[in-house]
Amino acid sequence: MKNQLLVTAIGEDRPGIVAKLTEIVAKHGGNLEASRMALLGGEFAAISLVTVPAAKMKELETALGALSKEGLTVICKETTGVSSERFAGHSFYKIALTGADHEGIVHKISAHLRDLNINFQSVETDVTNAPVTGTPLFTLHATIAVPASISYEALSRDLATLADEEAVDIDLVSTAVLHGEMVRA
């Protein structure tokens, strides 16, 4: 039987971190199921879902913890899959937000969606400089699970109001797939 282990790792960036992490996982019979890894500031950060035989779980956790000697902080947590009933009836959408960077954008959006009982499935944010002016531009890309009680039209209107308040653009796209292509709702 395979167990799931959520593994987070952070440390000063250098070549070989991913190879070292995955070497340890593979050596203990584990499999990297899903992961997000990035260079944030000068630090390497990773979060991964690993499946591993139950008999090797503790051994893997110990081996990953030993990476602290190499300057990598690793935290492991056993987890289980999401129940199929949890998001039954939900619709899934992608949000793309862009605008001038200012404090509080993520909080305003996340608190607003929380109040609507909308759950984030994934979120990615970034700040880049505009090509000509160098003005900091903020982007947020997210996948959200929306309860059946909220229509696309209502959510779209709601997000348009929020976009006006925050002086950003928010694009809402259904993740319904038709002939292999994402389609707008």
Image (spheres, grey):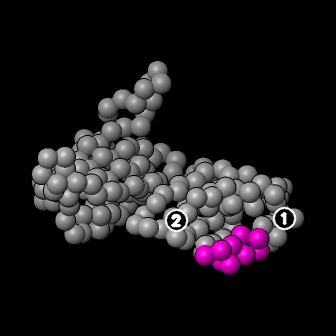
Where is residue 105? Give x, y as percent. 24, 64
SS state under label 2:
loop
Question: Measured along the vertical axis of the image, is residue 106 above or below residue 1?
Answer: below
> In this view, which residue lies farthest toward the bottom?
69
Most prominent secondary structure in the magenta stretch? helix
Question: Measured along the vertical axis of the image, is residue 155 above or below residue 103?
Answer: above
Q: Quadrant of residue 11?
A: bottom right
Visible residue check, residue 68: yes
Instruction: Indicate left or right for 102 with 139 as reference.
Output: left
Where is residue 175? Give x, y as percent. 41, 37
Q: Was residue 70 drawn as part of the magenta stretch in this picture?
A: yes
Q: Residue 27 bears which disc, if any? A: none
Nearer to us of marks 1 and 2 is: 2
| Residue topped by disc 2 | 13
Mark 2 surroundings: few (<14), some (14-19) or many (≥20) residues within 10 A: some
Q: Where's the C terminus, which quadrant?
A: top left
Where is residue 120? Give x, y as percent. 42, 57
Instruction: Indicate left or right for 106 with 142 as reference.
Output: left
Q: Which of pointers 1 and 2 lies earlier in the amino acid sequence?
A: 2
Q: Quadrant of residue 21?
A: bottom right
Say what amino acid the circle numbered 2 marks: Asp
In space, the residues marked 1 and 2 are separated at their CA atoms by: 28 Å
Q: Nearer the viewer, residue 155 or 160?
A: 160
| Residue topped by disc 1 | 56
The residue at 19%/50% (across/down) is 130
Give the extent of the magenta segment: 61-71
Where is residue 49? Give x, y as percent. 64, 57
How many numbered discs, if any? 2
Question: Measured along the vertical axis of the image, is residue 57 above or below residue 176?
Answer: below
Say what amino acid the circle numbered 1 marks: Lys
Q: Was residue 130 drawn as part of the magenta stretch in this picture?
A: no
SS state under label 1:
helix
